[in-house]
Amino acid sequence: MKTIFAIITLMAFLLVNCSTSTEPTNISALSITKNDNSLKINNDSFETVYLFVVERGRAAFLNWAPNFNDPKISAKDSININYNNIVGLEYPIKSGDEIIVYYWYKLDETNPEVFAKGVKL
């Protein structure tokens, strides 16, 4: 009888703890639309997202770290970033130029997990 009780207790514990998450509700909810002079970045998640946008070739040479002073997008909101505000992107923009949108959530101020999306212009 004690064995059955122990198994049921263990299963209940696992069900409760495995369903509890501290991660953002929708980590891939960032969508990017290219316009003539800017990017429109939508945050469809329920968390504020912070981001850093850089030209792909320049990204390898930068010494940066995610912080909470960079541009941010509130939950369920969007922003436009002009191409001339993208680090390392040179005018005139050519078809095939690539940028990287790095983004992170403020779950842990000391060590946020950084995600990236590449965009061809």
Image (spheres, rainbow, N blue to C red):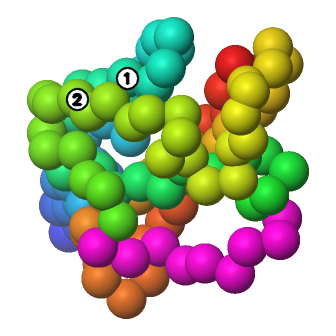
Q: Quadrant of the C terminus?
A: top right
Q: Is residue 76 above or below residue 46?
A: above
Q: Main secondary structure of the magenta part?
A: loop
Local packing at callout 2 (Cα closer than 10 Å; few below 14, some 14-19, many 20+) is some
Q: Which residues are magenta?
A: 60-69
SS at badge 2: strand
- Taking the spot 47% from the left edge, 73% from the top edge, the residue there is 66
Q: Is residue 64 magenta?
A: yes
Q: Picture quarter containing residue 51?
A: bottom left
Q: Quadrant of the N terminus?
A: bottom left
Give the residue type that dot 2 points to: Ser
The answer to whether the residues at label 1 and label 2 have Cβ atoms under 8 Å apart is: yes
Measuring from the top left, give residue 116's x and y in whole percent. Answer: 60, 46
Would you name the residue on which mark 1 appears?
A: 40
Q: N-terminal of the two: label 1 or label 2?
A: 1
102 lies left or right of 31: right
Would you name the residue on which mark 2 appears?
A: 78
- Taking the spot 49% from the left edge, 47% from the top edge, the residue there is 85
88 lies left or right of 53: right
Residue nearer the viewer, 18 or 42: 42
Q: Picture quarter containing residue 40?
A: top left
Q: Picture quarter containing residue 65?
A: bottom right
The reply to whether residue 94 is visible in this rendering is: yes
Q: Is residue 110 above or below residue 59?
A: below
